[in-house]
Amino acid sequence: MFHRLAPLSLGALFLTSCSGDLSALDPAGPYAGAIADLWWIMLFGAGLILSLVLVLLGLVFFRPGFGRSLSPKGWMIAGGLFLPVPVLIALMTYGMAQGEYLIGAWQNEPVVARVEAHGAMWQWGFRYPDLGDGVTTVGTLHIPAGGVVEVRVTSADVVHSFWIPRLAGKIDAVPGHETVVRIRADVPGRYGGICAEYCGNGHAGMRFTVEAHPPETYRQRLTALSAGVSAP
């Protein structure tokens, strides 16, 4: 296997790892997209600071006498404040702006469907109160594509964490407490979900699938499931 991977460049391997069913860097909705954008900007900022430090290090090695006119205290102030602080301020400002966007989107965008997610060692169950108390699924969450879905998350035993990396950020499932996360899939498709909080021996297998249906077939699909009818 190593022999087959060797010809690949580091860039190709990195880009490959940025995609996939559980990749937060391959967003399929606006909420996950905002988180992915923040990640890339933070990576760029960290790379910028590292590059500046490496340039200074190179000047010290290849230009003897560079920087001697500046005292040690001056270097501490310049390197510890003037070099990273502007970049960190820019990153913090952007991060806060993205946070405000997510909060504002939650407040302003209408909810088209509501779901209850219940975590228990080691599986996820879902109930659809908008369609009646009897509509439930296990291991697969059904949502309409193109609209905001509100998911109310609870736990039956220990702390779990509900996460659909391509659709939104994660949120804890706490016993005796209800937490809320909103998700949105721009297009119909299948997306992976996991428990992102270690919860015991079966944690690695505590996964689920999200099926985003066209809005016009969403209710029909769940009605068929509740009646035990196989979908075409």
Image: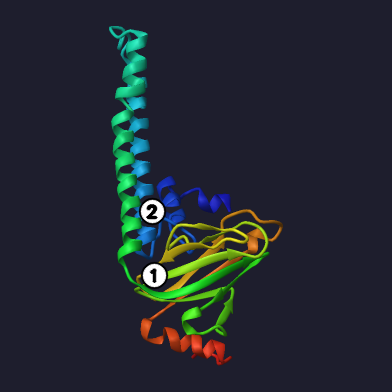
Q: Point out the tag, 2 or 1, that comes first from the N-terminus.
A: 2
Disc 2 secondary structure class: helix
Work out whether residue 220 or residue 48 is closer to the camera in this orientation and state it.
220
Residue drawn at x 28%, y 7% is 69
In this view of the protein, can residue 58 be seen by the observer?
no
**Few, some or many residues within 10 Å of mark 2 (<14, 14–19, 20+):** many
Query: Which residue is farthest right?
Result: 201
Measured from the top left, where is residue 125 in percent x and y?
A: 59, 73
- Quarter in which the N terminus is drawn: bottom right
Measured from the top left, where is residue 144 in percent x and y?
A: 40, 77
Amino acid under label 1? Ala
Residue drawn at x 38%, y 81% is 214
Residue 103, label in figure:
none
Q: Is residue 127 left or right of residue 28?
A: right
Measured from the top left, where is residue 36 in percent x and y?
A: 38, 53
- Whether tag 2 and tag 1 are in contact, CB under 8 A, the answer is no
Above or below, comparing residue 192 to residue 75 in the picture: below
Measured from the top left, where is residue 108 in percent x and y?
A: 30, 65
Work out whether residue 145 or residue 21 is closer to the camera in this orientation and state it.
145
* Residue 91, picture quadrant: top left
Disc 1 secondary structure class: loop
Amino acid under label 2? Ile
Residue 35, label in figure:
2
Q: Is residue 213 left or right of residue 160?
A: left
Residue drawn at x 36%, y 25% is 53
* Residue 85, picture quadrant: top left
Q: Is residue 125 left or right of residue 217?
A: right
In this view of the protein, can residue 107 be seen by the observer?
yes
**Few, some or many residues within 10 Å of mark 1 (<14, 14–19, 20+):** many
Query: Which residue is farthest front?
Result: 176
Which residue in the protein does label 1 denote? Answer: 185
